[in-house]
Image (cartoon, rainbow, N blue to C red):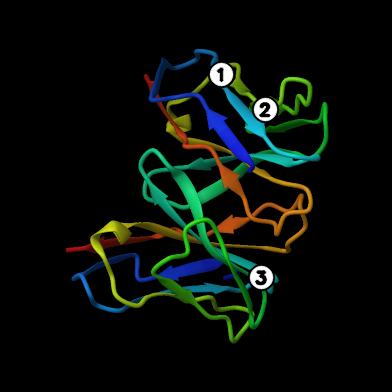
Amino acid sequence: GDSVTQMEGPVTLSEEAFLTINCTYTATGYPSLFWYVQYPGEGLQLLLKATKADDKGSNKGFEATYRKETTSFHLEKGSVQVSDSAVYFCALTASGSARQLTFGSGTQLTVLP
Amino acid sequence: DAGITQSPRYKITETGRQVTLMCHQTWSHSYMFWYRQDLGHGLRLIYYSAAADITDKGEVPDGYVVSRSKTENFPLTLESATRSQTSVYFCASSFGGQNQPQHFGDGTRLSIL
């Protein structure tokens, strides 16, 4: 079946450091890929998405590129802020699926001032 | 305000009791979903619904019942709660296309003693 493997956390960085959170997937066909972010006590919010190979999703300084050849969708940000501290989830919807999301296990990011 | 709301936010109950978690959305989204979030598992799909009166099982449906008599509501019932159902439950909705993001409520934290 479909699956998403995410970099184990937690990740702790200093403010202005470079962030990479790795995400790889297994799915048949052409899935759509998403990054969601969850702040403490809240639900998940869409951070960015990409729907076909070589697409780059971007939002709030975060970027991720859909790499079909390596089945990856790594999340990057050039300079993190304390306000970026949250849990980040990589997810996919498979082509031909009933539209449900398959999630990775999440990565806790803490940014220290 | 438009959005998706879950109630209650917190619930403590005892094993064997019936408990219902409510979910209401105002976007007229056709698809609605229930997930549970447990440490180390990310989010796992319990049930989903493609439209009123149409529901289907997700990855972990055992012990749960859903209904969808109106498009905007999608309640989740635990008919006889067990300790293993202690979790954070999230409701989500979307227009249903593969590329459409899901919008999440703030969650219900359920503890079963």
At label 3, the amino acid type is: Trp
> On the picture, is B77 further left or further right than A16?
left
The residue wearing badge 2 is A73
Residue B46 lies, in percent from the top left, at 50, 61
Q: Residue at x 76, y 24 (%)?
A: A67
Mark 3, residues whose alpha carbon is within 10 Å: few (<14), some, or many (≥20)?
Answer: some
**Disc 2 from disc 1: Cα separation:** 11 Å
| Camera-nearest label, 3 or 2 | 2
Q: Earlier in the sequence, mark 2 or mark 1?
A: 1
> On the picture, is A95 further left or further right than A86?
right
Q: Which quadrant does the N terminus of chain B fall into? A: bottom right
**Disc 1 from disc 3: Cα separation:** 34 Å
The residue wearing badge 3 is B27
Mark 1, residues whose alpha carbon is within 10 Å: few (<14), some, or many (≥20)?
Answer: some
- Residue B67 drawn above or below residue A18: below
Q: Which quadrant does the C terminus of chain B fall into? A: bottom left
Q: Residue under mark 2: which chain is it in?
A: A
